[in-house]
Amino acid sequence: MAYLVLANGDIYEGKRIGAAGDTVGEIVFTTGMVGYLETLTDPSYAGQIIVQTFPMIGNYGVIPEDFEGVSALRGYVVREICDTPSNFRSEGTLDSYLKSHGIPGICGIDTRQLTRTLRESGVMNAMICDEVPADRSAINQYSVGRVVPTVTVSKPQVFPAQGESRFRVALLDYGYKHNIVRSLVSRGCSVTVFPCTTTAETILEGGFDGLMLSNGPGDPEENVSEIAELKKLIGKLPVFGICLGHQLTALAMGGKTVKLKYGHRGGNQPCLEIATGRTYITSQNHGYAVLAGSLIGIGNETWRNANDGSCEGMMYPGLRCQTVQFHPEACSGPKDTGFLFDRFLAMMGGERLA
């Protein structure tokens, strides 16, 4: 027996899965039908309890080759967990994975009703526990806080290019997904991953052809020192930012960000490329968005969410800098926007994009 207690007072009774012990976090939902392993290992979920809207999770087991990073989430909520996975690549059950990584979870609750609540009321704090607490101050007082330093690498890591090395790329790690590196090295880029605390001087002295800004968790405005370093870097070399990297770039350029009611999480977010009028289905995981109107005269909005109209991409004329809110490297679903990495290579090759 276990309970999920929401900050609004709602209580769901279910069955304990994963690690023992109580946990508190910001509860969010993701709509992906597949890709639960990528979700569990995405550092951008640091400080959060994840709700999977798809009813059965764990049916293809645990496949370490599909991991995107180290699990940083606070808890896991599913309708039904599969105890007997069937996949030739599987190396264990999802429940065993949660236990071994210290992630408490709960199953057997009405995740459809829970998702409706989060859509109508917005994301909120929650607790997974064995007994409903009389004092719920721990739920109300919880804050995700500044989590980027908890998920960044501790020292630089180098990944050689596949085949002939065409470019050298510095990647500032705010909680990067491994497939960002894979997408670059497969295109002939040698990638050096740097901690989020790395100075602009270190990057510029490294003689790199381009700078990659990764995804990551939390409120972008809390990363004051990282934003200060980006101000020194933008315009000095080609820049490609993804997710949090997109938001931090906007803040460095004088723009603003806002917290969304319940965010975009899943592999089915439609995004319009403004220049072509074409809509792409994208993979996303974020709770904040860039306010394009705050960058008028500074940058051009290049992508827009077809559901809510929020900004999904920016281009900064003359600075060889492009950023997107979604994940063009994602493999949990669509891979339609992988061409954005090719545009980044074009910038490093001397082409200036409008």
Image: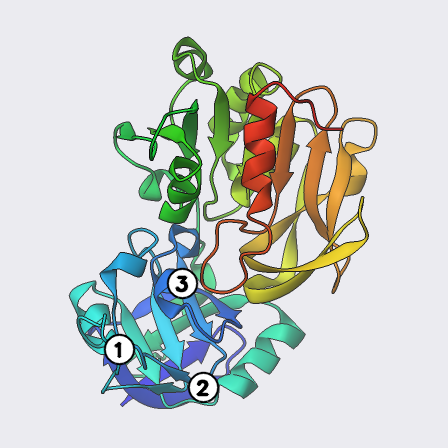
Residue count near mark 3 (Cα–Cα under 10 Å), binned few <14, some 14–19, many ≥20: many
Nearest to the observer: residue 260 or residue 53: 53
Residue at numbered disc 3: 39
Q: Which tag, 2 or 3, sits closer to the chain's start?
A: 3
Residue at 51% across, 71% down: 29
Task: Identify residue type, mark 2.
Answer: Pro
User: Label 2 belongs to which residue?
Assistant: 55
Q: Is residue 236 above or below residue 32?
A: above
Sequence-wise, which precedes: disc 1 or disc 3?
Answer: 3
Amino acid type of the residue tagged 3 in the rendering: Thr
Which residue is denoted by mark 1 in the rendering? 87
Toward which corner of the image does residue 290 lie, by quadrant?
Answer: top right
x and y percentages locating residue 266 in the rendered image: 53, 66
Q: CA distance from mark 2 to mark 1?
A: 19 Å
Q: Nearer the viewer, residue 211 or 228?
A: 211
Q: Secondary structure at mark 2?
A: loop
